[in-house]
């Protein structure tokens, strides 16, 4: 099976991460991907090793959380435990999904190659560099996030568990997301080329009509026909290309939707906890003395950047795909030939029933509304929580003054303190 440069890069790294335990078998001049026992054994050993180390780390943190006496250590261990459990869940879902549906990788690649041959698309240097740049940004963000996390918890996690449990786990999990981003990026390019072909037909139609008007005014005869310019344009090919791209998007959605759902949940949890801890460092640095504002800011930036890249690719692809019906309807309004108009109406009907939208298992769309919701939820939760705490502390302070000055001083202030402490805990 022929693969271009960027797709071959994806394939080799995915195989190293244990996500594609296959090899190519040449049969009749064609290389067919088949399951390789050695690669499958490597994938299973890697999956079991990482899962066992992750589980051991979770149990170890749980025991540390039970036996610790410091409030600061208790809070930090609880945060690390939550994040590590989320990382483990995301890794297990991604690895199992990739192993079960690993043939979809080659199915999507074959469909994209077939569509590329219809559009006469060849991966250019700029496109290749763009894909590699996106991959590099994501990988650097993953590595930076892992290293910063290890620096924050180096007193709890040694180098070997960090390398196996956190670094390898996050790289494998997030490189599976790179597969999704790459395929969406290629589909986005194909939809842009499809829309450009429709625009070329519309522009040529307008040019021919203007020439037709000039010829009619001079010679009172029509030497040009606007509809004849569309004879060379095969609308059946455009319909085939659009239908194939929609089929590819359906396969991509069904293959990566569960993984994207876990990834979004993981990013949302990390950003929420990081933002809350950052507010804690700003407003109450005595409680979280071991946390650094710069490391928290870098961590939140990395997580947000990863999510923005995925959402940006999905949103731009959906925009290009949903722009095609507008261009077809604009072209349809300029056609008077019944045969050509019938083909365009068939194309328009197909576009009506093939809406393009990326979703995470159908729970929410992958567009900018997701980012708005996450930003609103994180800021509202953090600000509301701290406003509530400061209001409770202010009420406690005013209540103490009231009972001290206007009522009996023998009234126990410990009772008031316990009441407000219970209110804060319940919140």
Image (spheres, rainbow, N blue to C red):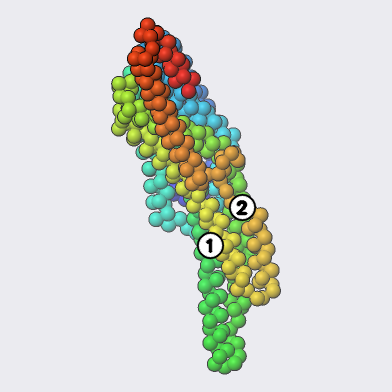
Identify the residue shown where x is 54% and y is 36%.
261
Residue 377 point in image, percent of width and height: 47, 36
Q: Earlier in the sequence, mark 1 or mark 2?
A: 1
Q: In the rendered image, which residue does mark 2 sit on?
A: 355
**Number of other residues with Cα within 10 Å of mark 1, as a class: few under 14, some 14 to 19, many 20 or more:** many
Q: Where is residue 226, by image quadrant?
A: bottom right
Q: Is residue 289 above or below residue 13?
A: above
> On the image, which quarter does residue 393 sit in?
top left
Number of marks in the rendered image: 2
Q: Residue furthest top?
A: 410
Q: Which residue is mark 1?
A: 195
User: Relative to 338, does residue 365 appear above or below in the rendering?
Assistant: above
Q: Residue 269: x, y in percent?
A: 46, 31
Residue 276 visible (yes or no): yes
Decide which of 375, 78 is in the foreground and name it: 375
Q: Nearer the viewer, residue 344 or 239?
A: 344
What residue lies at 58% left-to-right and 76% top-to-bottom? 229
Q: Are marks 1 and 2 in contact (CB under 8 Å)?
A: no
Which mark lies nearer to you, 1 or 2? 2
User: Gap in Å between the C-alphas at discs 1 and 2?
Assistant: 15 Å
In the displayed structure image, the side of residue 225 where residue 171 appears, left or right: left
Element under disc 2: loop
- Residue lying farthest to the front in this orientation: 406
**Where's residue 186, x and y in %?**
50, 51
The percent position of residue 90, horizontal first and vertical second, equals 50, 30
Q: Is residue 343 left or right of residue 384?
A: right
In the rendered image, the vertical position of residue 182 relative to residue 152, given as above or below: below
Q: Is residue 162 visible?
A: no
Residue under the image location 37 percent in, 38 percent down: 301
């Amino acid at each position: 099976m022929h693969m271009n440069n960027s797709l071959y890069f994806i394939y080799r790294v995915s195989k190293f991460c244990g996500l594609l335990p296959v090899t190519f078998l040449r049969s009749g001049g064609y290389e067919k991907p088949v399951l390789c026992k050695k690669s499958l054994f490597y994938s299973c050993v890697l999956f079991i090793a990482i899962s066992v180390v992750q589980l051991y780390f979770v149990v170890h943190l749980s025991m540390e959380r039970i036996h610790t006496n410091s409030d600061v250590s208790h809070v930090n261990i609880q945060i690390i435990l939550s994040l590590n459990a989320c990382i483990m869940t995301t890794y297990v879902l991604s690895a199992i999904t990739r192993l079960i549906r690993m043939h979809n990788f080659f199915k999507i690649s074959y469909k994209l190659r077939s569509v590329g041959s219809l559009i006469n698309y060849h991966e250019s240097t700029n496109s290749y560099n763009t894909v590699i740049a996106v991959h590099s940004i994501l990988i650097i963000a993953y590595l930076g996030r892992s290293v910063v996390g290890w620096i924050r918890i180096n007193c709890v996690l040694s180098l070997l568990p960090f390398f196996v449990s956190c670094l390898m786990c996050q790289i494998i999990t997030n490189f599976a997301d790179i597969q999704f981003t790459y395929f969406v990026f290629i589909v986005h390019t194909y939809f842009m080329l499809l829309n450009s072909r429709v625009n070329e037909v519309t522009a040529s139609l307008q040019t021919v009509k203007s020439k037709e008007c000039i010829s009619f005014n001079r010679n009172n005869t029509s030497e040009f026909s606007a509809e004849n310019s569309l004879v060379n344009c095969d609308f059946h090919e455009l319909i085939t290309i659009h239908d194939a791209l929609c089929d590819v998007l359906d396969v991509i959605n069904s293959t990566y939707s569960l993984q994207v759902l876990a990834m979004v949940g993981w990013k949302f949890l990390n950003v929420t906890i990081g933002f809350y801890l950052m507010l804690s460092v700003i407003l109450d640095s005595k409680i979280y003395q071991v946390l650094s504002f710069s490391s928290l800011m870098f961590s939140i930036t990395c997580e947000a950047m990863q999510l923005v890249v995925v959402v940006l690719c999905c949103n731009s692809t959906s925009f290009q795909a949903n722009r095609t019906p507008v261009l077809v309807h604009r072209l349809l309004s300029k056609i008077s030939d019944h045969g050509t108009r019938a083909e365009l109406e068939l194309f328009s009907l197909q576009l009506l029933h093939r809406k393009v939208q990326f979703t995470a298992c159908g729970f929410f769309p992958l567009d900018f509304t997701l980012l708005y919701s996450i930003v609103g939820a994180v800021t509202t939760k953090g600000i509301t929580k701290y406003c509530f705490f400061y209001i409770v502390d202010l009420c406690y302070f005013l209540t103490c003054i009231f009972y001290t000055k206007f009522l009996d001083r023998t009234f126990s202030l410990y009772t008031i303190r316990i009441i407000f402490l219970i209110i804060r805990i319940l919140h």
